[in-house]
């Protein structure tokens, strides 16, 4: 939970100075909490006295990226792949596809962009899931879904293949520089094009802000 909150409040995600200041204050609070909970001696002192030494977190010269990395391990390609596999097996993916189908009125292109971890190679599997949900009455067949032109689907497939090839080439360049041979690790190019993979996780698992809830309620 602390990690999710820190993702939402990381100062580097803010563009406006006012928002960055507020995010920094929130991140400082989270950092203080982590500093206590992760250190047995500090936690013991806090439990006994209610006091803590947080001077190191109060300056303007704090490197928040280093602070965040110290709090949480670096996420690797293997971590992302493991998360996606667990996500698919947990049933959450099916629910996400269902929700996206309803939201996008059966637009498969938008569904493929909307759901975490999907690539062009998953489209047949996604369609099978949607067809099954339509047969069970969980979803209604829309014109946009059943009458999608074959040319549009083919265009999407070619674009996906191109993205995969570009990602493979980029990975080869990285591997050459780092002298590593792990070129078969799955990389979702689409997720690299979005703001960050972290934002997707935060958006999915973190509670919406009060402003977002208010906006949603006003619709």
Image: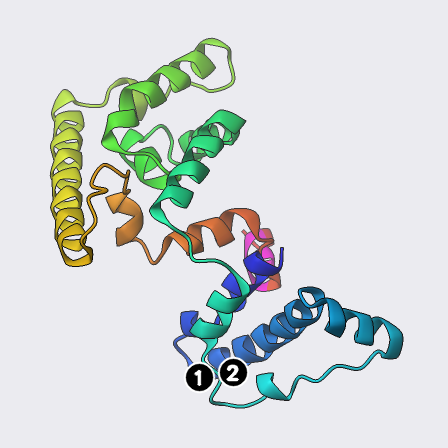
| Mark 1 surroundings: few (<14), some (14-19) or many (≥20) residues within 10 A | few
Who's the residue at 33% across and 19% down the image? 125
Taking 146 as reference, is 189 above or below it?
below
Q: Is mark 2 on a helix, strand or loop?
A: helix
Q: Which of 218 and 166 is in front in this view?
A: 166
Q: Which of 161 and 19 is in front in this view?
A: 161
Who's the residue at 65% across and 71% down the image? 35
Q: Can residue 188 be seen in this view?
A: yes
The boundaries of the magenta stretch are: 211-216
Residue hosting label 1: 17
Q: Which of 148 and 92 is in front in this view?
A: 92
Q: Is residue 143 visible?
A: no
Residue 94 x/y as whole percent: 47, 26
Asked if marks 1 and 2 touch (Cβ < 8 Å), the reply is yes
Taking 172 as reference, is 24 above or below it?
below
Residue 198 x/y as whole percent: 43, 55
Residue 84 x/y as whole percent: 42, 36
Residue 108 found in image quarter: top left
Q: Looking at the figure, which quarter contains the N terminus?
A: bottom right
Residue hosting label 2: 21
């Amino acid at each position: 939970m602390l990690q999710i909150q820190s993702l939402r409040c990381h100062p580097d995600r803010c563009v406006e100075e006012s928002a960055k200041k507020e995010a920094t204050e929130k991140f400082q609070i989270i950092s203080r909490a982590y500093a206590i909970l992760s250190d047995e001696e500090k936690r013991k002192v806090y439990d006994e006295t209610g006091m803590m030494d947080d001077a190191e977190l109060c300056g303007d010269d704090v490197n928040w990226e280093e602070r965040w990395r110290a709090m949480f391990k670096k996420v690797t390609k293997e971590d992302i792949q493991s998360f996606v596999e667990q996500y698919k097996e947990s049933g959450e993916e099916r629910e996400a596809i269902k929700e996206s189908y309803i939201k996008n009125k059966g637009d498969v292109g938008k569904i493929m962009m909307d759901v975490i971890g999907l690539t062009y190679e998953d489209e047949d599997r996604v369609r099978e899931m949607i067809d099954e949900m339509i047969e069970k009455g969980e979803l209604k067949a829309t014109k946009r879904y059943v009458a999608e032109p074959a040319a549009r689907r083919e265009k999407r497939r070619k674009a996906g293949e191109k993205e995969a090839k570009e990602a493979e080439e980029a990975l080869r360049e990285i591997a050459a520089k780092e002298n590593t041979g792990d070129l078969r690790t799955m990389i979702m190019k689409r997720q690299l094009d979005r703001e960050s993979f972290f934002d997707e996780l935060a958006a999915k698992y973190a509670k919406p802000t009060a402003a977002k809830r208010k906006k949603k309620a006003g619709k």
